[in-house]
């Protein structure tokens, strides 16, 4: 460095030391601000992602409740159809059993199946055949059995057999059976 | 003792103190709370993502269950959605009877969420076996049909006249239009 008495050295505010300090603080400030901006940006991204997740969850919720409703509806349909199919099968078995009950010597002319009863019209060679071969099994099935006879032209007897099941008795019996089963368990 | 500090050094010191205070204030008042918020939001997002995953899994399970039920009960579902057609019914089951006629009995009623209406049928069969076969075929028909009491069988010469009512269950609202 040259020293002169005539030409003074130029003095500047930004000395190398000050420049160094300014550089150091600029870097520090840059790092602080960039960290802050990074955090703000991330927060914004998180908010957006959360909104999207909430929307997806809402859509899934709607879809799940719609599917649950469909499942419920299918299960109700399935239960009802099974109930109806079972009733039809039971009905078929009942009719089969009814016709199997009638002995060959007795001829039916009409049969009416009611929900809680059975009315049979037919002819029998004599009352004993009817009483032993048809009335006896009917009595074991139905709670009330009424029979009436009137003579037919060929010497046989026409008969009307009216048979009923008492619903309240059936109810009591099924309750007793349920109780027995529960006791056994 | 006199301390000789140049003006320049005083400036430097002041700037340093100012920047230091700024850094401290900025860090404690802005950066640290923001960082805390960032951490909280990140944890919350992870929780939400986990929850979403659970929802997604449940959704997939429900979807699988629905598809299984739909494939297992396709026939039943179709039967409930099909409106009753008496002509088609007669045509389909005519083979079991010597004659078959179907007539509407009651107007449409509701049983739970299903439309139910009763139809009277009168027919002639050659043997009770035909009626058993009809009862078996009813369970495989295009509709959900329940055979109802009273059922009457009457001998007419070589044939048996049978009359009974059937209940047809349906989902469709336009069931009346088909009759």
Image (cartoon, coloured by chain):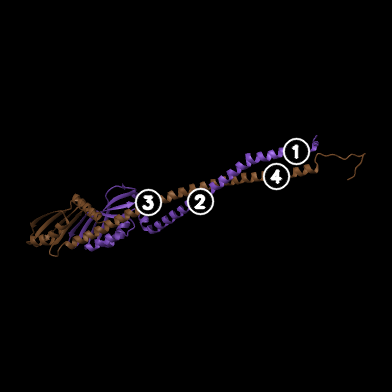
Query: Disc 3 versus disc 1: distance between alpha carbons?
Result: 81 Å
| Residue sitting farthest toward the top | B2
Secondary structure under badge 1?
Answer: helix
Determine which of the numbered discs, if any, sits on residue A28 in the image: 4
Residue A171 left/right relative to A66:
left
Instruction: Point out residue A19 in the picture as x, y percentages from the top left corner.
Output: 78, 43
Q: Residue at x 31, y 50 (%)?
A: B116
Marks 1, 2: nearer the viewer? 1
Query: Disc 1 versus disc 2: distance between alpha carbons?
Result: 53 Å
Chain letter behind tag 3: A
Q: Which residue is mark 3?
A: A73
Q: Which residue is mark 1?
A: B13
Chain letter behind tag 2: B
Q: Which residue is mark 2?
A: B50
Instruction: Point out residue B109 in the picture as x, y percentages from the top left corner.
Output: 30, 47
Question: CB atoms at circles 2 and 3 under 8 Å apart?
Answer: no
Chain letter behind tag 1: B
Q: Nearer the viewer, residue B161 or B62?
A: B62
In the rendered image, which quarter contains the N terminus of chain B?
Answer: top right
Query: Disc 4 versus disc 3: distance between alpha carbons?
Result: 67 Å
Dot 2 crowding, Cα within 10 Å, few <14, some 14–19, many 20+: few
| Colour chain B appears in | purple
């Amino acid at each position: 460095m040259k020293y002169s008495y005539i030409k003074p050295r130029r003095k500047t505010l930004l000395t190398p030391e000050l420049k160094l300090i300014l550089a150091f603080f600029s870097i520090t400030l840059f790092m602080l601000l960039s960290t802050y901006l990074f955090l703000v940006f991330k927060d914004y991204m998180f908010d957006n992602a959360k909104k999207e997740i909430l929307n997806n969850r809402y859509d899934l919720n709607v879809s799940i409740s719609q599917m649950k409703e469909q499942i419920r509806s299918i299960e109700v349909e399935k239960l009802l159809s099974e109930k109806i199919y079972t009733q039809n099968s039971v009905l078929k078995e009942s009719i089969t059993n009814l016709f199997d009950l009638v002995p060959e010597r007795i001829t039916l002319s009409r049969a009416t199946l009611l929900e809680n009863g059975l009315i049979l019209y037919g002819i029998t060679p004599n009352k004993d055949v009817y009483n032993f071969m048809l009335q006896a099994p009917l009595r074991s099935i139905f709670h009330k059995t009424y029979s009436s006879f009137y003579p037919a032209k060929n010497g046989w007897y026409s008969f009307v057999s009216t048979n009923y099941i008492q619903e309240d008795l059936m109810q009591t019996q099924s309750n007793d059976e349920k109780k027995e089963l529960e006791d056994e368990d | 003792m006199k301390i000789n500090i140049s003006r320049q050094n005083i400036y430097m010191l002041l700037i340093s103190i100012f920047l230091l205070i700024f850094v401290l204030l900025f860090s404690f008042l802005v950066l640290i709370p923001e960082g805390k918020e960032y951490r909280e939001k990140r944890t919350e997002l992870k929780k939400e993502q986990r929850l979403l995953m659970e929802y997604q899994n449940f959704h997939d399970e429900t979807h699988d269950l629905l598809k299984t039920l739909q494939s297992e009960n396709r026939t039943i579902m179709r039967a409930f959605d099909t409106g009753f057609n008496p002509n088609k019914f007669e045509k389909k089951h005519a083979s079991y009877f010597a004659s078959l006629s179907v007539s509407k009995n009651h107007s449409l009623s509701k049983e739970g969420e299903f439309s139910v209406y009763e139809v009277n049928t009168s027919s002639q069969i050659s043997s009770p076996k035909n009626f058993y076969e009809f009862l078996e075929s009813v369970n495989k028909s295009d509709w959900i049909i329940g055979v109802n009491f009273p059922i009457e069988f009457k001998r007419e010469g070589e044939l048996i006249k049978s009359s009974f009512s059937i209940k047809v269950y349906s989902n469709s609202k336009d069931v009346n239009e088909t009759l």
